């Protein structure tokens, strides 16, 4: 009883087969009995007509000498293989002395004063010239009986009736024998069908059992569990859907693990990033508060260090807030139709202030025609400034930075520097939060700039990538032609 569906299916198949057998047996009994009765009646009608024709012939030749009447009547039951009555209009029933009886002479007769009502109707129909049929004489004969009546003619006048009675018991016996054969056949069919039903039920429930086991494993967190059921029906489709669900749950689990790792790394990084400036500020304040440092020049140095650390802390907090806003699904960009050339020129103009301090030249290569897109002007400018700041930071004095715009099935903005470049180990992680190289040029960085630039471009339904060159690095921003589908959610 562990597999309830299997038992239910088996019981259903068995009930259907039994019901089919009962219906088939009932139909067989009714049809077979009726068919046998019809055949027997036809045979009796032929005999009754034959006997009636013979007696009519005797009646037509009653004036001639000849014998055979008595012998014919004596052996009439044997010839007909049934009980034969000869009935006149007065319902006198006799089996011999027909000539004398029809001449109103004495004869050996039997008279039934009270026949069943319907029996009299059969006799009346025969005397009207019809060949009739019924079962109304059963009560007189004492058994279920079929009666066939045929008229005896004399000079176009019915002078008598031939009634042949045949018991139905023989037909019922044939029906019982036929029914026995049907029951044996049904039993054999039930046995074979039971085996087939058990096999089909097993084939139906086995995949369900496997899917149940897989579902239990999935509920326990084992997302590597698979059904591995190869069927072309609905069960197979359900099994494949569960396998797809298993794969997606596995991916979701890995993504959740990555998110947890990122969250832990974020907490670790932010704690580290905040701890350093706070520790410096606290130490400086304690020294100044305890009057440990009293020399004006040293005091000024500590105050400058405190100002620098507070600026770094402010920049870190602002970058965190900026990145948090960009990653918030409720944050919306302020979109408008703009010219990318204007955004690049404005960004380069702002970036030259820092580049001039290292005597770095920023060269632009822009198309003459307008490059109109829909986007947030300030955010696109911010992302370009982050790339320019990064390029200036890792470039040497008198280096060169190249900024270009290419319009080809979209817009490609490249920022190329010839600085120290990015190591192969760092390249896959440069757009992650708090990831920063250990180079001395990046000691003041927060590790959030490229992450912010990446989020801004993603919001514009674009992409950003970095490529390590033989000398320096090339950052590429891609924006599609149709930037109307900006991600604002």
Image (cartoon, rainbow, N blue to C red):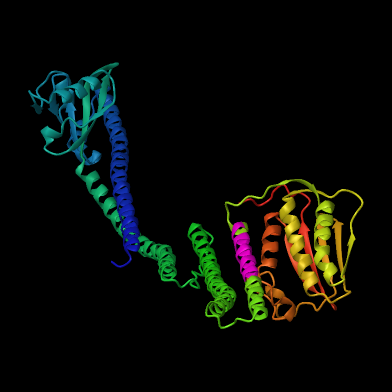
Q: Residue furthest right?
A: 368
Q: Is residue 235 left or right of residue 391?
A: left
> If the image is split into quadrants, where does the N terminus sit?
bottom left
Residue 311 forms part of the magenta stretch? yes
Q: Please tell me in which quadrant of the rendered image residue 134 appears.
A: top left
Which residue is at 66% across, 76% downward?
A: 300
In this rendered view, identify the residue nearer to me: 128 or 401.
401
In this rendered view, identify the residue nearer to me: 140 or 288.
288
Q: Residue furthest front?
A: 295
Magenta region, residue range: 310-325
Q: Position of residue 197 (x, y in %)?
A: 38, 61
The total number of labels drawn is: 0
Is any part of residue 63 visible from this angle? no
Q: Please tell me in which quadrant of the rendered image residue 212 appears.
A: bottom left
Which residue is at 67% across, 55% downward?
A: 459
Q: Position of residue 96 (x, y in %)?
A: 15, 30
Q: Is residue 118 left or right of residue 23?
A: left
Q: Residue furthest bottom?
A: 292
Q: Is residue 235 left or right of residue 361?
A: left
**Magenta span: chief secondary structure:** helix
Q: Is residue 336 above or below residue 187?
A: above
Q: Is residue 28 above or below residue 317?
A: above
Which residue is at 49% across, 63% downward?
A: 242
In this rendered view, identify the residue nearer to me: 290 or 97.
290
Residue 356 forms part of the magenta stretch? no
Q: Please tell me in which quadrant of the rendered image residue 168 appears.
A: top left
Q: Is residue 56 above or below residue 402?
A: above
Q: Is residue 348 above or below residue 23?
A: below
Is any part of residue 139 visible from this angle? yes
Q: Position of residue 318 (x, y in %)?
A: 62, 62
Q: Is residue 343 left or right of residue 488?
A: right
């Amino acid at each position: 009883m562990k597999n309830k569906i299997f038992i239910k299916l088996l019981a259903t198949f068995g009930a259907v087969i039994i019901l089919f057998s009962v219906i088939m047996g009932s139909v067989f009994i009714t049809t077979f009995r009726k068919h046998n009765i019809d055949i027997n009646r036809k045979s009796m009608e032929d005999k009754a007509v034959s006997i009636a024709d013979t007696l009519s012939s005797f009646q037509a030749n009653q004036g001639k000498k000849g014998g055979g009447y008595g012998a014919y009547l004596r052996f009439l039951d044997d010839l007909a293989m049934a009980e034969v009555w000869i009935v006149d209009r007065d319902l006198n029933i006799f089996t011999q002395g027909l000539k004398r009886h029809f001449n109103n002479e004495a004869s050996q007769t039997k008279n039934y004063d009270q026949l069943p009502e319907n029996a009299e109707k059969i006799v009346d129909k025969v005397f009207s010239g019809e060949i009739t049929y019924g079962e109304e004489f059963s009560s007189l004969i004492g058994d279920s009986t079929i009666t066939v009546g045929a008229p005896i003619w004399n000079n176009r006048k019915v002078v008598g009736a031939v009634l042949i009675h045949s018991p139905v018991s023989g037909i019922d016996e044939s029906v019982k024998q036929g029914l026995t054969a049907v029951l044996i056949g049904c039993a054999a069919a039930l046995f074979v069908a039971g085996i087939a039903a058990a096999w089909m039920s097993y084939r139906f429930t086995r995949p369900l059992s496997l899917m149940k086991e897989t579902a239990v494993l999935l509920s326990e967190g084992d997302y590597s569990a698979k059904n591995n059921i190869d069927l072309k029906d609905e069960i197979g489709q359900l099994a494949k859907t569960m396998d797809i669900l298993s794969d997606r749950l596995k991916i979701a689990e890995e993504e959740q693990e990555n998110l947890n790792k990122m969250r832990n790394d974020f907490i670790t990084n932010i704690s580290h990033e905040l701890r350093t400036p706070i520790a410096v500020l606290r130490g400086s304040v304690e020294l100044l508060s305890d009057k440990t440092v009293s020399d004006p020049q040293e005091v000024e140095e500590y105050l400058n260090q405190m100002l620098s650390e507070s600026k770094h802390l402010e920049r870190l907090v602002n970058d965190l807030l900026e990145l948090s806003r960009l990653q918030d699904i409720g944050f919306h960009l302020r979109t408008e139709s703009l010219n990318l050339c204007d955004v690049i020129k404005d960004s380069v103009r702002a970036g030259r202030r820092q580049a001039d301090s290292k005597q770095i030249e920023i060269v632009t290569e822009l198309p003459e025609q307008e490059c109109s897109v829909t986007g947030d002007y300030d955010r696109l400018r911010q992302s370009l400034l982050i790339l320019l700041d990064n390029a200036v930071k890792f470039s040497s004095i008198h280096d060169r930075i190249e900024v270009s715009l290419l319009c080809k099935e979209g817009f490609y903005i490249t920022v190329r520097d010839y600085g120290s470049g990015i190591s192969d180990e760092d390249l896959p992680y440069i757009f992650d939060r708090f990831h920063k190289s250990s180079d001395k040029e990046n000691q003041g960085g927060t590790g959030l700039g490229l992450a912010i630039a990446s989020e801004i471009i993603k919001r514009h339904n674009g992409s950003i990538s970095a490529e390590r060159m033989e000398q320096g690095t090339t950052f590429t921003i891609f924006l599609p032609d149709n930037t109307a589908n900006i991600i604002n959610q």
